Amino acid sequence: MVEIEIVGNALCLDFTNTVSARPVARWDVLAAADDAADWAAAVGHPLTALPANVSAELARTREFREIVYRVFRPLANGERPDGDDLDAVMREYADAAAAGSLRPGGNTYSLSWPGGRTLRTLRWEVAVSSLELLTRGPLDRLGECPSCSWLFLDTSKNGRRRWCSMATCGSRDKARRYYARHST
């Protein structure tokens, strides 16, 4: 089991952060069903059922993760995402909307799907989160950690968040810079 860090401030961004780093990952939460289930529970979307073809569903889920990453990474860097990736997110959202129904929850409604919570419904929840962030923003507050490439929504008051987490990448980066300054 890998340690789960939730730092994205949006489900779709936390979903992209289910690998340790890019381009070469040391671990991938979506590589094994147990780790994927632990992550889903940690972000408040616990899985209640795993399909018989769990390997194929995990592969689809990893593929969708990379699509979502390719949508939000350019936006975090002031660029536009590829239209094919945007279309893929929209198709997943359309599947979610077609299969779901609206259920009341407090002062709003949310999409809900019949049956147990599966990797498919997790992808649908991520697609809904992606569309909400894309259409409501604030896209100018998206960031990418310079150390591990994790994505985050900067919710700090001054809008100057730099790392995925000060506890991990921020501390390492500051220590590296300190060592570089004092080792000459």
Image (cartoon, helix red, strand yellow):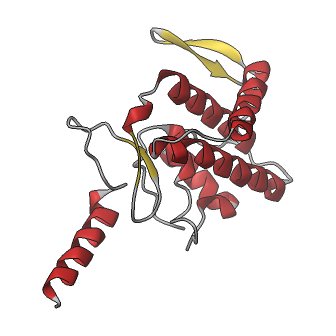
| Image coordinates for residue 46, horizontal then vertical, percent | 59, 42
Residue at screen point 42% across, 50% down: 6
| Image coordinates for residue 67, horizontal then vertical, percent | 67, 46
The extreme bottom residue here reads 184
Left or right of 111 in this view: 51: right
The extreme right residue here reads 53
Closer-to-camera residue (43/164): 164
Quadrant for residue 56, please give it.
bottom right
Left or right of 66 in this view: 182: left
The extreme front residue here reads 79
Closer-to-camera residue (122/64): 64
Q: Is residue 121 above or below residue 145?
A: above
| Image coordinates for residue 146, horizontal then vertical, percent | 39, 61
Q: Is residue 97 above or below residue 173?
A: above
Q: Is residue 96 above or below residue 32?
A: above
| Image coordinates for residue 104, horizontal then vertical, percent | 56, 11
Left or right of 39 in this view: 102: right
Disc count in the image? Answer: 0
Residue at screen point 39% across, 49% down: 7
Quadrant for residue 49, please give it.
top right
| Quarter of the figure with the N terminus | bottom right
Residue at screen point 64% across, 20% down: 111
Residue at screen point 30% across, 53% down: 162
| Quarter of the figure with the C terminus | bottom left
Closer-to-camera residue (61/76): 76
Q: Is residue 71 above or below residue 66?
A: above
Left or right of 104 in this view: 102: right
Quadrant for residue 71, please give it.
top right
